[in-house]
Amino acid sequence: MSWETVIGIEVHVELSTESKVFCGCKTRFGARPNTQVCPVCLGMPGVLPVLNRKAVEYCMKAALALNCEVSGRTKFDRKNYFYPDLPKAYQISQYDMPIGKNGWMDVEVDGKAKRIGIRRVHLEEETGKLVHAGDDITSAESSMIDFNRCGIPLIEIVSEADMRSADEARAYLVKLRSILLAIGVSDCKMEEGSMRCEANVSIRPEGSTEFGALTEMKNIASFKAVYKAIEFESKRQAKVLESGGRVRRETRHWDDLKSETVFMRSKEQAHDYRYFPEPDLVPLEIDRAWTDRVKDTIPELPDQRKARYVADYGLGQRESSLISDDMDLSTYFEKGIEAGAEAKALANWMTGELAAALNASGTEISSSKAGPAEMAELLGMVAKNEISGKTAKEVFAEVFAKGGSPRKMVEAMGLGQISGEEELRKAAVAVIDANPGPSADYIAGKENAIMFLVGQLMKATKGRANPKMANQLLKQELDGRKKNL
Amino acid sequence: MELYEFGVGQLAEAFEKGIASPSEALSSVLERIAGLEGEVRAFLLTDEEGARKAAAKADGLWLAARKGGTKPSALTGMPFVLKDNICTKGTRTSCGSRMLENFVPPYDATVAVKLAGSVLLGKSNMDEFAMGSSTENSAFGPTKNPWDTRAVPGGSSGGSAACVSAGFAPFALGSDTGGSIRQPASLCGVVGLKPTYGRVSRYGLVAFGSSLDQIGPFARSVEDAAMVFEAIAGHDPKDSTSSPRPVPDVRKACSKGVKGMRIGLPKEYFANGLDPEVRDLVMKAVLRLKDEGAEIVEVSLPSSMYGLAAYYLAATAEASSNLARFDGIRYGLRDLGAKDVVSAMKRTRSQGFGDEVKRRIMLGTYVLSAGYYEAYYNKALKVRRVLKDEFDEAFAKCDAIAGPTTPEVAFRFGERTEHPLSMYMSDIYTITANLIGIPAISVPCGLSKGLPVGLQLAARAFDEETLFAAAAEVERGSGFAGRIGGGAR
């Protein structure tokens, strides 16, 4: 039987506000443990939260950029559970009245556009961070808590279960990150935990409209891991069903080292969070004027960027999507153009040679040694016929591996194209003399024989000849001999 | 007349005129405390050294003022007491619980900051986490009623009420979630005010029922209570639920009289369960208001009988969440015998909380649990809305609502501890003001069997002016102002 995978994704993003969501503490990452804390974020007895307006605006901004309805009246609720990193033993969150709801985002996978629903975007507070002297909280000799993170504003973005493949899930996350970076509400660093995601995966027979039992996967620390976890989990579920079993609704843990998901807890063991309205905060009224003001601060988003790339640079739909959907690719592309690269050539390289090299080496484009400036320099030399396309690829490989200026590399390696006519003419004569047969064929009217001679000339010059010029010179030389016959 | 018998207004005048200094007033109350505290046990902590320092500083300020310097605020140098659920930086705040027996807050409550110029004598006893009506739920033993030490002082702010009643301090602060200021004020024969919800900052008050809690004053006269109210009220940026409305001049309102004021008597407040003597004293006081020009109208609050039930759903739900932070991880009691984090939390909470607190946490947890929220918590919210509508209707016919503060005078120790519901009944008249957020005050109106009886007045939200005008009139009629607890004399 063939199965369809159904995926929904929950993303948590730390907002990059100066201060925390309910107190004035700083939010800087990497500060000494427990130095950015106060009685409020430590949940001391008697303290009260005061809502950070900026955090509300950032959440609204994200919601608006994801085409959500932004409600006029919202409120906060308490989500109650015990855990040492949660000092009040409840998290202030939003239960039934999120700031944003019913939004959507378009992604493109394999040239096909797809709309993914955004169920809700809500604001809540971050927890503290546990550091265990051991593997986990149950087996550790001791555990320590850093509350610096506690109270940093967090938004949760919940998609509809609209994705049908790991590729779509990845495209969704890439574009979501790109949007959030564009509007400047978060630095979205998965490695620092400022962006985290959980995937809900279920499968169903192809063509079915019913949903299967879903599993929720936690501890996914990179986009690559999301992809792998979804692939693994859909295969695992298929195996369970094909062997006559039943998929249980449960939470599973992604083990990145072993590349597998493992059972964490069942639905029955799930918390009853006992949500109720947060009595320490008054309901939040968001009027139209405020929403409009926030809307005005939203800069160009990926979709608009794509349209601009097509209109201004003549890029194709597909490569335009590929670049504009990814904030890092867009940044690279625009910096490259700023440095003088020709847009189409740059896009070609980015989606071809560069993408392949990044993929093969597992490098992020933002840390590529062949940066936008280097790429612009390289493409400039190709455009001016200073090097051939073939040479450019060699130089690119060198720059990608070691860094440095492509121009200097060309000079050092003596790879500059021979464009001096005299030098090349000498070489052409030598090739003709060394290949009397094909030369005679050409003179006898077999024009195709010139291709062989061009090839020989390129070989003789180690590819440094301009092919067009080589062709021209060989013809001139042979045509001259024909006349003299 | 000894200095400890002086009220807030009298002491302020004495300080201003140089008749007495804050240090002299302090010595007088300390002597009074030394003589009677062994019997009354109103304090969980006294800070004589800190008080002496603060008084000496205030001495200088009043002296400088008399020499032409700026006049300090009226409460400067005034001895006072805080209920032990109001956080004081560097001074233990236990909430009457083993859980916080060694908890020293790193910050001051807003009301403590506002009273920084006054002289803090100590922290008063209370029912654990403000849950109770007699102080019998204090983990550190009960406080006695200064009028009769066999009787309870009421609760949960019983320690603060007893301090003021016994002459330990001219004023004290308490907190009122369902009557915790008004009921002990009534039982101890002092004035106790629960301000409008949002009038006084809750920042630093260890939360019990966040949507119900309010801090308010105890004093031996209505005008004294007015002075304290003015000092602690007002918007606080640290409390999002505090109101930006300007604080009225309630001290001035005390001399306004009640001519033309419409006083509503809810018939439901004078029905079954009300002690006849209490009823007679309250009615006499009401008739005196009529003599002074007030118009007495009958009003009806038919749903007030559901108030108690709604209260025990709403308050316990919030409490179950508010008290969840006491898990032994960061401060307070911690059970060191546990082998893992879950059992450490369980054991800490099992040992740290008393029976009543556990009862309410369990009740509140149940009320909020999946499948029951609609039936209980949401139902309670609906009752609150209905009650508000009924009060709005009543306030269309009258300016203040009068009735007894409690159904009976102070009961004996142990009389109700076995029957939580009978204890809860003690708050039957007081809880509605918390459920709908309106201000209410208890003012003594006489003695029954040698124990004080309190009359409660309630007014529209933020109309403390009317409340004080009417309360002052009741006080003038009863002649109770300034009286110090009889039994402990």
Image: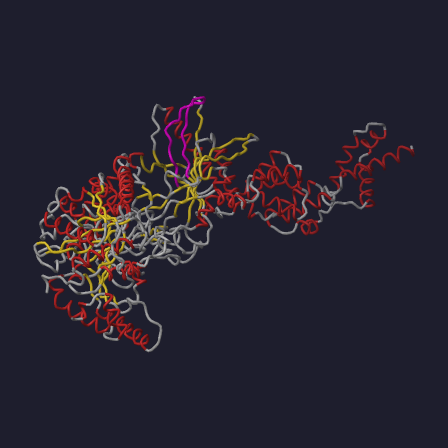
Q: Residue at x 36, y 37 (%)?
A: A252
Q: Say above or below: A259 vs A209.
A: below
Residue A199 lies in the magenta stretch:
yes
- Colour scheme employed for the rendering of this structure: secondary structure
Q: Nearer the viewer, residue B223 or A317?
A: B223
Q: Nearer the viewer, residue A365 or B447?
A: B447
Q: Say above or below: A213 vs A131.
A: above
The percent coordinates of residue A280 (x first, y second) are 33, 49
The image quadrant of residue B227 is: bottom left
Asked if residue B413 lies left or right of residue A475, the reply is: left
Asked if residue A361 lies left or right of residue A15, the reply is: right
Q: Nearer the viewer, residue A380 or B105?
A: B105
- Residue A191: in sight, yes or no? yes
- Residue B324: in sight, yes or no? no
The percent coordinates of residue A88 (x first, y second) are 31, 50
Residue B163 lies in the magenta stretch:
no
Q: Residue furthest bottom?
A: B67
Q: Residue at x 9, y 49 (%)?
A: B415
The quarter in which the C terminus of chain B is drawn is: bottom left
The percent coordinates of residue A472 (x first, y second) are 81, 37
Q: Say above or below: B93 vs A84.
A: below
Count every numbered label the image shows and give the total: 0
Asked if residue B403 lies left or right of residue B201, the reply is: left
Q: Residue furthest right?
A: A484
Instruction: Report the magenta residues as a range.
Output: A198-218
The quarter in which the N terminus of chain B is drawn is: bottom left
The percent coordinates of residue A58 (x first, y second) are 47, 46
Q: Nearer the viewer, residue B77 or B318?
A: B77
